[in-house]
Image (cartoon, rainbow, N blue to C red):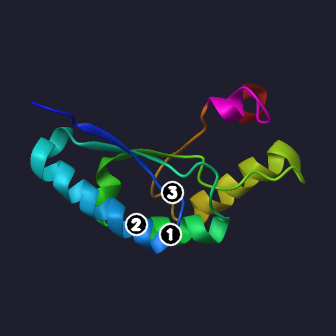
Amino acid sequence: DGATVVKLKVGKDPSQDAERTNVAAELLLRRAGPEARLRLDANQAWTVDEAATFIAALSDSTVAIIEYLEEPVRWSAEGGPEKLLGDWEVLSERTSRRIPFAADESLTEGTVTCRHLE
């Protein structure tokens, strides 16, 4: 009865975004129970350090219902797609692969192609 999946835009202040995400997850879990899922979109807003701060501040119950964090770090023309994907790997390692990352169509149809994701 109602939505079980919520997509939240994050990407401003990492600590405040984590607090807001934790509150949203708690509310969603109360309403939807084990079916609850969160999708997060940072829209390339953070540095690796900022994204790591955000991920570290998420509660375990929030992490348990996150399907993915979309575009966690900024794209920079210097270094090309390899730098962006390398930043994702660094972030993943720094956060113990706590949550999966996702690319949206702006990446897969533009600068970072599906070939780079192989």
Q: Is residue 44 above or below residue 34?
A: below
Q: 10 or 63: nearer the eye?
A: 10
Image x and y of residue 106, in percent: 68, 33
Q: Are marks 1 and 2 in contact (CB under 8 Å)?
A: yes
Residue of label 1: 14
> In this orientation, does residue 90 appear?
yes
Which secondary structure lies at badge 3? loop
**Left of 6 or right of it: where is 32?**
left
Locate residue 73: give its quadrant.
Answer: bottom right
Residue at 81%, 43% in the rendered image: 81
The residue indicated by pointer 3 is 97
Q: Is residue 54 left or right of residue 60?
A: right
Separation of disc 3 and disc 1 at Cα?
A: 18 Å
Q: Position of residue 14 (x, y in %)?
A: 50, 69
Residue at x-position 70% and y-position 55%? 74
Start and end of the magenta stretch?
105-113
Secondary element at tag 2 = helix
Q: Which residue is situated farthest in the right direction here?
A: 78
The amino acid type, in three-letter code, at marker 3 is: Arg
Label 1 secondary element: helix
Q: Which residue is depicted at the point 14% across and 42% down? A: 32
Q: What amino acid is labelled 1 in the image?
A: Pro
Q: Is residue 93 above or below residue 102?
A: below
Q: Is-magenta flag for residue 110?
A: yes
Residue of label 2 = 18
Question: Nearer the N terminus, badge 3 or badge 1?
Answer: 1
Q: Position of residue 28 (x, y in %)?
A: 20, 49
Q: Pointer 2: residues within 10 angstroms few (<14), some, or many (20+)?
A: many
Q: Is residue 103 left or right of residue 112?
A: left
What's the distance in space between the residues labelled 2 and 3, CA to CA?
Answer: 17 Å
Of residues 75 and 59, the one drawn nearer to the viewer in this rendering = 75
Question: Residue 3 falls in which quadrant of the image?
Answer: top left
